[in-house]
Amino acid sequence: MKKKWSLKNLLITQFVLCAMIPALLLSSLLISEFRTIQTAEQIIKQRAQTEKALLQVEFELEKLALQLQQLTADSHAALAASSGIFAPNARNSLLQIADQHPLAKAVLLVDTTSWAVEAVPIDAMLLSLAPIESQLAALFEQDYTATKSTYLVSSAELTKSLLKATTDKRPLNPELNPEIIPDVIVMQLPLKLSDGTANDPRSRLTGAIVAFLPVHSIKALIEQYTADATLQNIYWQDQALLTTLSADEDRVLTSATLAVPGLATTLTIDFATSKTTVLSAITAMTYRYTLITFVFLTVVLLIGWFFVRLEVKPITSLNALVRRYAQGDLQQGQQYFPFSEFEQIAAVLHTMAVKLREHQELLEGRVEQRTIELQQAVTELNNTNAELVKMQQQLVEAAKLSQIGILVAGVAREITAPITKSLEATNALQQENLHINQAMQNNVLKRSVLENYIQESKMNIIQLNQHLRRADELIQSFKAVAVDQSVEQRRNFILYEYLQQVMLSLRYELGQYQVKIDIKGDQILVVQSYPGSFSHILTNLVLNSLQHGFSSDQPQSISIDFSVLADGQLQIIYRDDGAGMPEPVLNRIFEPFFSMAGQQGGSGLGLSIVYNLVTQRLKGSIVCESQPGHGATFIITLPIRIVVKHRKNVDA
């Protein structure tokens, strides 16, 4: 039985849901709005902070570019690049720039052959300038018309050398692996040797100032100015320069641009802050709200339990009252309840109990009277049923005896002819013997008379032998079939020969019609079963065909096919080409006492006996197929023991 809810639990649940659902929905909506507002505020705050930081970075880059520009106007640097004179003075200027601007990891003084004359730090002298050689060559080709240029170089080898050339000699940070962050911003300025502050158009380039700014240095400086936000990535022309950093979906993202002096395209900087940090205040408020809600729910449950208990207690009492009524206790008096509705129900139940007692007493009297009448009816029905069973058994036995009587009558008629012929042959032989005896006594026996006697005796003996053998065959066939039908014993028998014997015992009945019998199957197949049941079944099927399907003035045929199926069962198919049966008759042919020839004295037990023998005695099945004008087919399937297995099919 499906488990039912109690009214108490339902009332408590309803009380809690009505109290909590509106509060939960409203609080969830407010918390969601607070989270949205907090996120928006964080974006504004983060954008302001990052823009301020980028302004400071841009200021540092402008200072660096300005000092590098001032260095190009220093004649010491130009002379150092062209002839090596005043190299210490140029180096001091480079050191001053490197100390003031940590963004520049290396500042080189390069001559027109792309050789480093001076470098800060000193290890930068070993830097390979191959990645920027084409840019330097282009600068030197411009000669006195050359101007400063800033560009981005992607070279893992150059970045690796710059990191190794740092003066702190600290181990390389794995996050700054140059194979992952190979991008370097290069500031390239021409060195011109001229008198005065103005450049002489006729002056020639003596070299160039090259400053290397690795992207990771800009990243470190940005992170220094943005303590509350995390630098997510740096993009140049939509290309991510910090490929080691992956976007996290659970973050608040903002973007800003960084202008590098001389660089044609600005850098796009993405910043991110974890939502856990952004929403920490909202999360704390949610925890507090959850605790308050739990306390409030506990109080509501206690109050609800108190009221529900007050409401359910009379229901429990009413339930106990109804249960006692249901158990048959109709003598209890009327009970009273604190609520008028329950008291009205109790009053109605009490009135019903009083009326039920009255009807119960009246019903008990009627039941007692009806029980006596029913017992009498049952006794009469049992007696009638016993008589019907006895009558049915008598009819079945009568049907069996009728079959044996038919066999006896048929065999008697068949055996009359050979017996009569035998008697005639015996009388003729006796007369010839009397004549020859008289001739011998009178001494008038002639040779021709003796030879004639011998010839006639021989013919009579042959005829007598044939007729007596025929009578013996009929008697043996009848004896085998009759014994099997009267005494049912399980034995081994050749199925083909036994079917022939059954057909032979029905020779007289078949002789009344123009019927051709065709038996097909393995002639050496030996089975172990009840041959009497086979005889009963085939006899009833043949008599049913003769009585209901055939006409005496037309040629008819009956075929019996038997074979062993793949599952080891025996299948017998009985067919006739008689009148057939309509569907209403076909549906009832196996019912006891159902007969279409009742007016001619049919018992209606023939096919019923066949069905019982097949299904009960032989534990098999039988199916009938028929249509009007197309004969009838009976398919019998029997589980049977094969003594001699099937070898080949031989048609009879």
Image (tube, grey):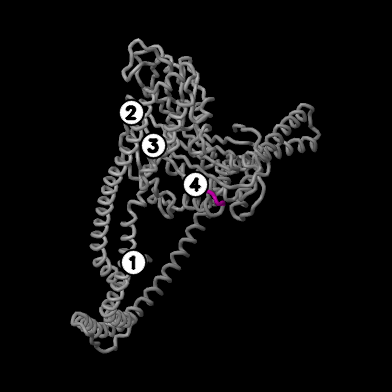
Q: Nearer the viewer, residue 443 or 200?
A: 200
Q: Are marks 4 and 1 in contact (CB under 8 Å)?
A: no
Above or below 171: residue 78? above
The disc, 2 or 1, on the residue closer to the chain's N-terminal end is: 2
Q: Which residue is mark 3?
A: 233
Q: Amino acid at mark 1?
A: Leu
Q: Which residue is mark 1?
A: 291
Alpha carbon of mark 2 to alpha carbon of mark 3: how far? 20 Å
Residue range in magenta is 618-622
Residue 259 falls within the magenta-colored stretch: no
Secondary structure of the residue carrying numbered label 2? loop
Secondary structure of the residue carrying numbered label 1? helix
Q: Nearer the viewer, residue 579 or 467?
A: 579
The disc, 4 or 2, on the residue closer to the chain's N-terminal end is: 2
The disc, 4 or 1, on the residue closer to the chain's N-terminal end is: 1
Alpha carbon of mark 4 to alpha carbon of mark 3: how far? 88 Å
Q: Dot 4 surroundings within 10 Å: few (below 14), some, or many (20 or more)?
A: some
The disc, 2 or 3, on the residue closer to the chain's N-terminal end is: 3
The extreme top residue here reads 202
Secondary structure of the residue carrying numbered label 3? strand
* Residue drawn where x is 32% and y is 83% of the image: 324
**The disc label shown at residue 622, or none:** 4
Q: Which residue is mark 2?
A: 261
Q: Are marks 4 and 2 in contact (CB under 8 Å)?
A: no
